[in-house]
Image (cartoon, rainbow, N blue to C red):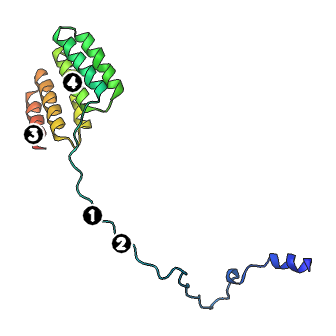
Amino acid sequence: MLAVAVLLSGCPAPSQRPQPPGTPIPEPQPSPSGPLTPIPPPAPRAPPAPRENHLSPATRSLVTQSRTLASHGDLDGASSTLDRALRIEPNNPLLWIELGRLRLAESDAHQAESCGRKALGLASGDHGTQAQAGRLLADALRAQRRNQEAIEIERQAFMR
């Protein structure tokens, strides 16, 4: 009896046996739970709402400190305070705009331009922030006497 059980255990079940060529394939049987119901298509999505960038409470506090330092003539202190804010939120375009404005106050138009371009790249979907970044970039270009580029940037920033 043990020998028969061993022999049968190696045989595939009837549904698993290879069928000879030309044998019709049986139709699938409905599941015990009933017929399958079609899945409805997904509902169309509404366009995304415009995005607005905000500062966190920590970075807002650092920006306030930076502005106070700058107003008292401590541009180095203001810059290091903004650097701390950027370590907290490196992808916040508002901080890059703030740093770019500070760089303009330091007469570093090339760095201000870089900050403006970075802010513009990060501000996608937020038209207000894009406009601020565009103004910064245009001001930085004007400070470099690149007036025609500044005019074009302003035109693009306000057409968004």
Out of 76 and 20, give the one closest to the viewer. 76
Q: Quadrant of residue 31?
A: bottom right
- The residues bearing labels 4 and 1 have C-alpha atoms spaced at a distance of 39 Å
* Left or right relative to 35: residue 14: right
- 2 and 3 marks in contact (CB < 8 Å): no
**Mark carried by residue 98:** 4
Residue designated by label 3: 158
Residue at position x 15%, y 37% in the image: 128
Q: In the rendered structure, which amino acid carries the disc numbered 1?
A: Pro
For the residues labelled 2 and 1, the Cα–Cα distance comes to 12 Å
* Lower sequence index among marks 3 and 1: 1
* Eye-nearest disc, 3 or 1: 1
Q: Which amino acid does label 4 sit on?
A: Glu
* Nearer-N-terminus badge (4/1): 1
Helix, strand or loop status at disc 3? helix
Q: How many marks?
A: 4
